[in-house]
Image (cartoon, grey):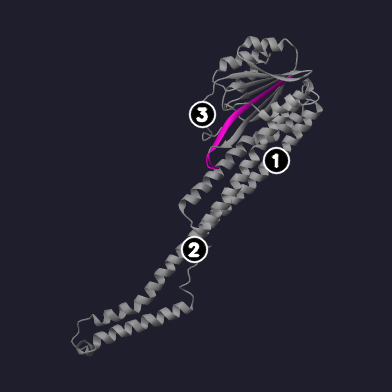
Amino acid sequence: MPNSLYLAGGRATTVLSAVVLWPSGAQQHQLATLGELEALLDQRLPIWLRINGMGQPHRIRDALRCCRIPESFIPLVLDTPQATRVDSMGEVIAVVLHRLRFSRDPLNLISDQVSMLLTHNCLISIEEAPSAEPFASLTDWLVNKTPAAAGEDLDDLLHYMVDNILDGIFPMLEQMANRLDDLEEAALRDPRPRVLARTYQLRGNLRRIRQQLWPLRHQILLFLRQNQPVMGPDGLLGFQEMAQNVEQIFESCEILRHQCDAVTEAHMASTGNRMNQIMKTLTIVSTIFAPLTFIAGIYGMNFDNMPELHWRYGYIASLLLMGAIATMQAIYLWRRGWFEDWTAPRR
């Protein structure tokens, strides 16, 4: 994983909660001890176990063992950061994603790992970052759903959570696109070095988003080819839509990458125009003062046989001559368009 991705706020305290899908409707339960979790599991009802925060890995490990999760999957969800992946073994499906967001602006990218495990009658979500309500919209939908959700809806819940994380990337890309538009305008108006530095930072964020989603491109297709006893037809259809979302994100990242190149090219072009303007100004000054320097050099020689040296009006005449030459040259260069400023800021 890239080193620039970091966890905001440190490791949060582990909080366990559960949403039990009773026949009458979904009910939420706050779990203070593992005994309460075991009591809910003994009911043999579909359950969504929500683990918020990874500050107590031993507690998470005990909760996974209560849910009869194989030991091979425990390091996959506890070790951070993990590469994005969709994996399955037997009757357990594991999905590891990263919820990406910006701290204050599109220049600082934050990543929080979200792991999901799906078995028969049990869905487990493990969120690295603290939140008041894990997947609040999904919880409200379950509580108010009519008819009540059943065990066969757990694969739909898994797809909803993955889709919720992926959909959060599109507003980020839109925000980055708006920021790149502003940087391109700034590159044309006032091409300062900080414009190019911010463009490189946005380009690096795009690269990190692509690195986060790159494994999903082939892992989802491989997952769809497998015979999954836990995943129903609706869940498989949801993963097909997920593959399309990943492709759209990649296409959007590619478009934004080209926009970063456009900002860089605009900055280079504006810088080149300013350099040409500077060289043109220096050329004008040199062109005007070259004949004046020539005249001053001639009359600065100390020869005895120079009639103008003893002329009463020689000094004034030489100044008038140099002024006339400078005026004629300035008029000539102005008519040729040399005094036009091509780097003036647009309004």
Marks 2 & 1, CB-CB < 8 Å contact: no
Residue in the image at 22% along x and 88% along y = 306
Q: Which badge, 1 or 3, is on the more N-terminal residue?
A: 3
At mark 3, the secondary structure is: loop
Image depth: mark 1 or mark 3 in front: 3
Question: Over which residues does the magenta segment extend?
Answer: 104-119
Which residue is disc 3 drawn over? 9
Residue in the image at 51% along x and 35% along y = 4
Q: Residue 277 versus residue 305: which sits nearer the camera?
A: 277
Residue in the image at 40% along x and 80% along y = 329
Mark 2 neighbour density, 10 Å: few (under 14) some (14–19) many (20 or more): some
Q: Residue 134 versus residue 201: which sits nearer the camera?
A: 134
Residue in the image at 31% along x and 85% along y = 320
Q: Amino acid at mark 2?
A: Asn
2 vs 66, left or right, is: left
Kindly identify which numbered label has been placed on residue 247: 1
Image depth: mark 3 or mark 2 in front: 3
Which residue is disc 2 drawn over? 273
At mark 1, the secondary structure is: helix
Q: Is residue 35 above or below residue 181?
A: above
Q: Amino acid at mark 1?
A: Glu
Give me the C-alpha separation between circle 3 and circle 2: 46 Å
Q: Is residue 97 above or below residue 197?
A: above
Magenta stretch holds residue 347: no
Q: Quadrant of residue 28?
A: top right
Q: Quadrant of residue 19?
A: top right
Give me the C-alpha separation between circle 1 and circle 3: 31 Å
> In what quadrant of the picture does the N terminus appear?
top right
Q: Position of residue 136 (x, y in %)?
A: 66, 28
Q: Position of residue 325 (x, y in %)?
A: 36, 83
Q: Which badge, 2 or 1, is on the more N-terminal residue?
A: 1
Q: Amino acid at mark 3?
A: Gly
